[in-house]
Amino acid sequence: MLDRMSHQLNQVLQRKRDRERLAALLPGGSRERPIIVSSAAVIEPRAVRTPCLHCGGEYRIHEHERAASSVRRVDVGCRQCSAPRSIWFRLVPHELN
Ligand SMILES: [Zn+2]
């Protein structure tokens, strides 16, 4: 009985890890795969609109960090299940296109 429960728990944790690993491959999931934006003003609304990986809920901004001149990292947490996530952005102003 206990074995069965821990087996189920392991499966849940495994699925959670799989989703997190998958998220790292999505746009914004890592510094190497940032979401490209043309203005810093759209970064936070964009981060908030990204659905939570685990429950589809909305994110709340915890921190908005300037990792480099054009690279921003936004740390968010889900409003519903409080799962944390970091979303990476790269600023590419239109004038440079
Ligand atoms: Zn959530």
Image (spheres, rainbow, N blue to C red):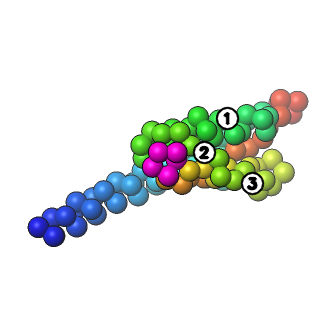
Could you say whether the residue bearing mark 1 is in a helix, strand or loop?
helix
* Residue drawn 39% across the image and 55% down it: 16
- Mark 1 = which residue? 45
Tell me the tag on residue 89: none
Give above or below for 12 relative to 88.
below
Q: Is residue 32 in sight in this rendering?
A: no
Left or right, 33 with reference to 90:
left
* Residue drawn 22% across the image and 67% down it: 6
Number of marks in the rendered image: 3
Where is residue 21 shown, x and y percent of the image?
A: 46, 54
- Mark 2 = which residue? 60
Q: Which numbered mark, 1 or 2, is in the foreground of this view? A: 2
Where is residue 9 shown, x and y percent of the image?
A: 27, 62
Amino acid on which disc 1 is placed: Pro
Give, as a single range, the part of the protein colored magenta. Answer: 78-82
Magenta portion: prevailing SS class:
loop
Q: Residue furthest right?
A: 95
Q: CA distance from mark 3 to mark 2?
A: 15 Å
- Mark 3 = which residue? 65
- Quarter of the picture containing the N terminus is bottom left
